[in-house]
Amino acid sequence: MLKRTLYCILFLQFFSGILLCQNRGKTIPFKMSARLYITVPHPISNKAFRHSFTGIYDIMANVNFQVFHGFQVGLQYHNNLWKTPDNKLPGLNVYGQSHLGGIRIGYDIVRSETSTAYIGITGEEGIMHFTGLSFTGIPSDVAVKSVYKLADLQLDAGIFFYTEGNFAIGMNVSTTLSNYRFDPYTIYLNQHNPRPYVASDLDGTLAYFNFGFNVVYSFLKGKAAE
């Protein structure tokens, strides 16, 4: 997780000089924005999670304040839902839902009077909660852990187009890298898997990518420092 974080920071530093030139001479009329992202998550790793769950939805909502010409800082809430499908774990209806909050740093790139592209990086902390667990052979006095803490780093990019006044819609793509090492044995998915898990399936931490659309509302007119 630390190595991935360092790579992301170096990536942003490398492009910071380029970004500073993107909005030179362009007007950014709003200093704040509220953004809603509705996407579908697709698991990348680890193999055990990818072979057990399918993404149902991923929703992110953030409020951003422009601190420098194009650069923004904001707060984000993030929620997503995963399910065990019949083509992976037949007859099982286990759900995994995450709730996270964090700080986002982003940069808006004005493309025209009606379109804006953006990139962002968000650090989050929260939980993953599993429900609908089914298992046998476990003593009734044994408490099965169903809530797990996690932290992640999210990179996102997209574009939106103003349709009327302050409102805009567009597309968003993101990648999320977490420190959560999913283990199906802790929630007894191994009792239902027709293809037994192997040791290598547990290597790595939860990571996934998203693709979907966004809705943006910009407000508080004013010019940020340049």
Image (cartoon, rainbow, N blue to C red):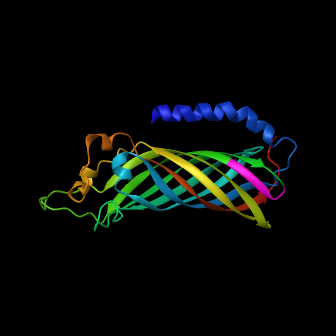
Residue 63 seen from this side: yes
**In the drawing, does residue 122 fall left or right of residue 46?**
right
Residue 166 seen from this side: no
Task: Say which quadrant the C terminus sits in.
Answer: top right
Is residue 115 part of the magenta span, yes or no?
Answer: yes
Task: Say which quadrant the N terminus sits in.
Answer: top left
Q: Image point 26% across, 53% down: which residue?
A: 195
Q: Position of residue 161 (x, y in %)?
A: 75, 60
Q: Image point 53% across, 56% down: which residue?
A: 77
**In the drawing, does residue 103 fall left or right of residue 195?**
right
Is residue 104 part of the magenta span, yes or no?
Answer: no
User: Where 13 sits versus 78, above or below?
Assistant: above
Q: Nearer the viewer, residue 197 or 162?
A: 197
Q: Give the number of marks.
A: 0
Q: Position of residue 68 (x, y in %)?
A: 75, 42
Q: Nearer the viewer, residue 196 or 67?
A: 196
Q: Image point 79% across, 46% down: which residue?
A: 224
Q: Position of residue 219 (x, y in %)?
A: 75, 60
Q: Position of residue 130 (x, y in %)?
A: 33, 60
The answer to which image quadrant residue 187 occupies is: bottom left
User: Where 129 sits versus 10, above or below?
Assistant: below
Q: Main secondary structure of the magenta part?
A: strand
User: Where 86 sits versus 117, above or below?
Assistant: below
Q: Nearer the viewer, residue 136 or 198?
A: 198
Q: Which residues are magenta?
A: 113-118
